[in-house]
Amino acid sequence: MADSLFGIHAAALELRSQRMGLLASNIANAATPGYKARDIDFAAALEARMGGDSADQAVNDATRYRVPTMPSLDGNTVELQAEQVAFSENAVGYAATLSFIRSRAETLSRAMKGE
């Protein structure tokens, strides 16, 4: 029902939330030797989600390892500044998507009240 009421925004919010967790994990493991940073190809995940895949399947298929610009000697591929930028951009997208959903819910609520 959420898909029909909120369209692409419901799927986008779910994917952005999962991406935020993945980016946070990258940031948390910035000093872990051998840790390989990952990210979600958001466009590919959203396309798969809208094509009928479950959110988990869409995320799994769209998750990629990051290729570092400057690899570290301990094998860790997290570049903290890049992760922070990606996290911030994703947070802005999350907030915008949430705003669209909130606006749609308010419009539906007013319509049901007859306002």
Image (cartoon, rainbow, N blue to C red):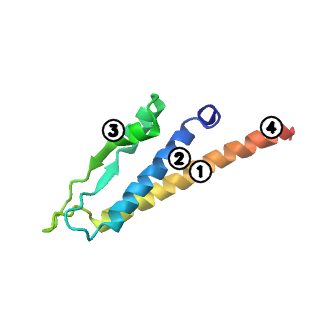
Q: Secondary structure at mark 1?
A: helix
Contact? badges 2 and 4 (CB < 8 Å): no
**Residue in the picture at 48% in, 52% down:** 17
Identify residue for label 2: 13
Q: Residues within 10 Å of mark 4 (few under 14, many from 20)?
A: few
Q: Secondary structure at mark 2?
A: helix
Give me the disc on residue 111.
4
Q: Is 62 positioned to the left or the right of 50 in the image?
A: left
* Front: mark 3 or 1: 3
Query: Can you say whether 81 is above or below 15 in the image?
Result: below
Where is residue 3, by image quadrant? Answer: top right
| Residue 106, position as x, y percentages in the image | 74, 46
* Front: mark 2 or 4: 2
Q: Residues within 10 Å of mark 2 (few under 14, many from 20)?
A: some
Identify residue for label 1: 98
User: Rounded to the nearest whole Å, what is the CA distance between mark 1 and mark 4?
Assistant: 20 Å
Q: Which residue is nearer to you in this view: 27 or 35?
A: 35
Type of the residue with mark 1: Leu
Q: Which residue is nearer to you in this view: 76 or 5?
A: 76
Q: Residue furthest right?
A: 114
Give me the disc on residue 61.
3
User: Rounded to the nearest whole Å, what is the CA distance between mark 2 and mark 4?
Assistant: 24 Å
Q: Residues within 10 Å of mark 3 (few under 14, many from 20)?
A: some
- Locate the C terminus by quadrant: top right
Type of the residue with mark 2: Leu
